[in-house]
């Protein structure tokens, strides 16, 4: 019996996925749940398991190709005794899709975003039939768009989907939220083709930054930490992590999630720190969990590991979710100050610039000290200037400690 397996919805709300690599070849025998291929989602590389046990007859695409959701991926030749089970599989998978958790032999559930005090989950069962996907009639939208719609009180089903393949875009949500205000769209740039379209992390960055631009009331303050008193150069990244913990202890309001639809704010007990990592594929932001409970040695080991796996694109989606605060250590490359953008639902981000040798006023004469430039951006809708300044003052005080 010959069966075609189509690219399933991977839970990102995107109409397509790029194939990173195949783990099988034509003529090979595979078992259920054996990885077939790796595809790139917004920020992670995800393995797609086989929904069947049988022989691979044909691969419909090659590594580097972009395949639309619902289009053929693999042709299988299944044993005759598997016919009955195959015919019953779509109904079984549809039933699983209605529950918050799927049995391990039913595929993989991906896609999660925290919003307000509940979870917004796209239940995408890898291996579900394309027909079952179409029958759900779920509005297609990326996670950032769903978050924006929720906060603006906009029903996604009421939006006119102008994105490719019926995808609801940020502009569509804004147009629905402000019907009397025409949304100005940028004119098409001559000479650009489908090959020039943003993919993977760069596409995710464009969506996140658009959401940040349109929604958050940004305010940035700048200052310097005089670290000339450090006995040794030390581990600047880990010192910054420790200083953020000190800042949160002094002013917890910056370690929070904010939902303007309430409006509501939830101050978080633990500090889950997102660390921006620059890669050839774009900016990727993994999360260090509960940094306040870890020693400097533990943090360094975890940071080295997470950076290595981020650059190797083996970081998992779960390791990039639910941060409460963000650190950008851009000064390792260049630059003194910046205006880093806050990504909702968090309310603040701290950025550290390149170390400077500045002339400062000494007790009796000018002196040259090593100083660390700092830039703190916060969401002024829910964080006051006083709260931000108290936080930054505590950060500077901790950094200026000799050890």
Image (tube, rainbow, N blue to C red):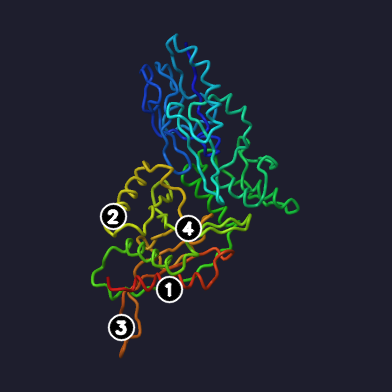
Say which label, 3 or 1, has the lower sequence index: 3
Residue labelled with disc 2: 298
3D distance between C-alphas at marks 2 and 3: 36 Å
Task: Label 3: state its secondary structure.
Answer: strand
Reading the image, the residue beneath label 4 is 268
Q: At numbered mark 4, what does the secondary structure look like: helix, strand or loop?
A: loop
Q: Which numbered disc, 3 or 1, marks the residue closer to the eye?
A: 1
User: Which residue is labeled 1 in the image?
Assistant: 393
State the separation of the CA atoms marked 3 and 4. 41 Å
- The residue lying toward the viewer, choosing from 193 and 143, is 143
User: What residue would you read off at disc 3?
Assistant: 367
Query: Residue 143, position in %: x, y?
Result: 55, 44
Q: Which of 245/207 is in front?
A: 245
C-alpha span from label 1 to label 4: 20 Å
Q: Quadrant of residue 46?
A: top left
Q: Is residue 133 above or below residue 84?
A: below
Q: Residues within 10 Å of mark 1 (few under 14, many from 20)?
A: some
Q: Is residue 198 left or right of residue 28?
A: right
Q: Is residue 40 above or below residue 341?
A: above
Q: CA distance from mark 3 to mark 1?
A: 23 Å
The residue positioned 58% from the left and 48% from the top of the image is 147
Precedes in sequence: disc 2 or disc 3: 2
- Residue 4, given in percent of the width and then of the height, sits at 49, 19
Residue 80 placement, left or right of 263: left
Q: SS class of the residue under badge 1?
A: helix
């Amino acid at each position: 019996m010959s069966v075609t397996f189509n690219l399933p919805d991977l839970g990102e709300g995107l109409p397509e996925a790029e194939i990173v690599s195949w783990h099988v070849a034509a003529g090979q025998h595979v078992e259920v749940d054996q990885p077939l291929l790796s595809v790139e989602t917004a920020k992670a590389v995800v393995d797609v398991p086989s929904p069947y046990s049988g022989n691979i007859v044909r691969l419909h695409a090659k590594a580097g190709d972009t395949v639309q959701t619902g289009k053929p991926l693999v042709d299988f030749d299944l044993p005759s005794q598997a016919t009955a089970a195959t015919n019953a599989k779509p109904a079984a998978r549809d039933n699983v899709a209605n529950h918050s958790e799927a049995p391990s032999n039913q595929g993989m559930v991906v896609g999660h975003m925290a919003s307000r005090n509940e979870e917004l989950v796209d239940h995408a069962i890898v291996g579900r039939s394309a027909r079952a996907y179409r029958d759900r009639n779920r509005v297609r939208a990326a996670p950032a768009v769903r978050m924006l719609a929720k906060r603006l009180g906009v029903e996604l089903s009421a939006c006119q989907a102008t994105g490719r393949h019926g995808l609801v875009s940020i502009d569509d949500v804004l147009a629905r939220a402000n019907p009397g205000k025409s949304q100005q769209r940028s004119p098409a740039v001559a000479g650009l083709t489908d090959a020039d379209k943003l993919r993977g992390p760069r596409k995710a960055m464009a969506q996140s930054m658009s959401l940040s631009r349109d929604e958050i009331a940004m305010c940035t303050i700048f200052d310097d930490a005089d670290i000339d008193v450090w006995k040794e150069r030390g581990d600047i990244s880990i010192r910054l992590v420790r200083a953020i913990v000190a800042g949160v202890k002094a002013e917890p309001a910056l370690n929070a999630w904010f939902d303007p639809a309430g409006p509501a704010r939830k101050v978080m007990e633990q500090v889950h720190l997102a660390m921006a990592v620059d890669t050839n594929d774009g900016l990727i932001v993994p999360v260090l969990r509960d940094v306040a409970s870890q020693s400097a040695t533990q943090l360094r080991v975890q940071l080295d590991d997470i950076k290595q796996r981020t650059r190797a694109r083996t970081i998992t989606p779960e390791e990039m979710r639910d941060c409460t605060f963000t650190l950008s250590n851009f000064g390792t490359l260049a630059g003194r100050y910046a205006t880093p953008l806050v990504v909702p639902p968090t309310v603040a981000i701290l950025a550290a610039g390149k170390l400077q040798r500045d002339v400062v006023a000494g007790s009796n004469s000018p002196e040259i000290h090593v100083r660390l430039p700092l830039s703190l951006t916060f969401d002024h809708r829910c964080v006051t200037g006083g709260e931000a300044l108290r936080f930054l003052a505590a950060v500077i005080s901790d950094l200026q400690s000799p050890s």
